[in-house]
Amino acid sequence: MNTSRIDAFGEDVFRNSTYIDKLDLAFSQFFVRTPTGSLLAIATGMRADFPQLKTNLQGAGFDIASVASLIVPHFESDEMGALPDFMAHNAALVAYAHPICAHALSDIFSVKTKILKDETPVTINGEVVVPIHAKHVHQWDSLVVYVPRLKALFSSDIFMSYGPVDGEGGTLDNIVGSIDKSGYIPSLEHLASALKKIRKYDIESIFPMHGAPIRTHIPETIDGLIEHCETHRAVVAS
Ligand SMILES: [Fe+2]
Ligand SMILES: [Fe+2]
């Protein structure tokens, strides 16, 4: 059975999530209310889940047409599958992505795209965002998004954990176990590289696409994951 819900975190962050019982895994999409009042979406969710997403947003007081911009963290169905449905409600929608992903989105969907450069801040609908490329975590074109105003990291598949979206998010053990179980982040070398870039930002909340948000012990969790990557690599290499 699938269950769907929308949650608010503070004034300006909204999360739509679908928990799939059979997989024990949740898929989340995020909506940031920008200083201009329009919504910046991060990930679309899959097409089959779009009608419920639209209903959930309406329940929270938002029209899907107010999604003016969309960040696609990588080219995968849960991150960009429902892009045509968002475009159908707002023809002026702009999609932001890694160059490889942006070219693919533009070619396939004829959507207006803008390229996100690594750790180069960009202002989207009045909101400053810092894209951080996370190559091969797990796709070549992966990136995560830091929003300085909110001190929030929208981490896509990094810090993923199995289970529902309630509670305080994955502990280090939980995250490591989830990475091992999923097999979706096979390159610990690339994961460590991404984490070292992420580590220097002032982060109060991590919002992963899968699992609950993390709001405590963030530096320790990042350091622990880096250590896990480096230790595990050493074991594999010896
Ligand atoms: Fe993914
Ligand atoms: Fe994912």
Image (cartoon, rainbow, N blue to C red):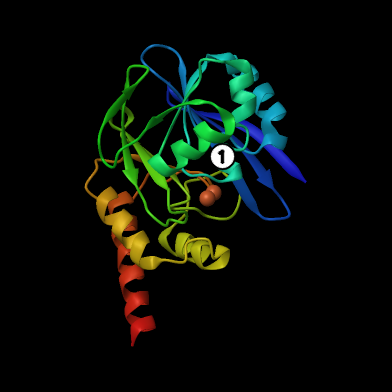
Position of residue 131 measured from the top left corner of the image (x, y, whole percent): 33, 38
Q: Foreground residue, 172 or 186?
A: 186
Which residue is disc 1 drawn over? 28
Position of residue 127 measured from the top left corner of the image (x, y, whole percent): 33, 22
Position of residue 144 measured from the top left corner of the image (x, y, whole percent): 39, 43
Q: Does the residue labelled 1 lie within 8 Å of ligand 2?
A: no
Q: Residue furthest bottom?
A: 238
Q: Which residue lies furthest to the left in this view?
A: 200
**Amino acid beneath label 1:** Ser
Regarding residue 81, the answer to whether it shows in the image is yes
Is residue 226 shown left or right of residue 16?
Answer: left
Is residue 238 shown left or right of residue 20?
Answer: left
Occupied quadrant, residue 206? top left
Residue at the location (48% across, 50% down)? 157
Q: Foreground residue, 46 or 172?
A: 46
Regarding residue 206, the answer to whether it shows in the image is no
Residue at the location (35% across, 68% down)? 229
Residue at the location (53% across, 14% down)? 66
Position of residue 58 measured from the top left corner of the image (x, y, whole percent): 64, 17
Label 1 neighbour load within 10 Å: few <14, some 14-19, many 20+ = many
Q: Residue furthest top?
A: 36
**Which quarter of the figure is the C terminus placed in?**
bottom left
Is 91 rendered above or below residue 107? Answer: above
Is residue 197 shown left or right of residue 177?
Answer: left
Is 142 rendered above or below residue 104? Answer: below
Q: Which residue lies furthest to the front in this view?
A: 107
At mark 1, the secondary structure is: strand
Occupied quadrant, residue 120? top left
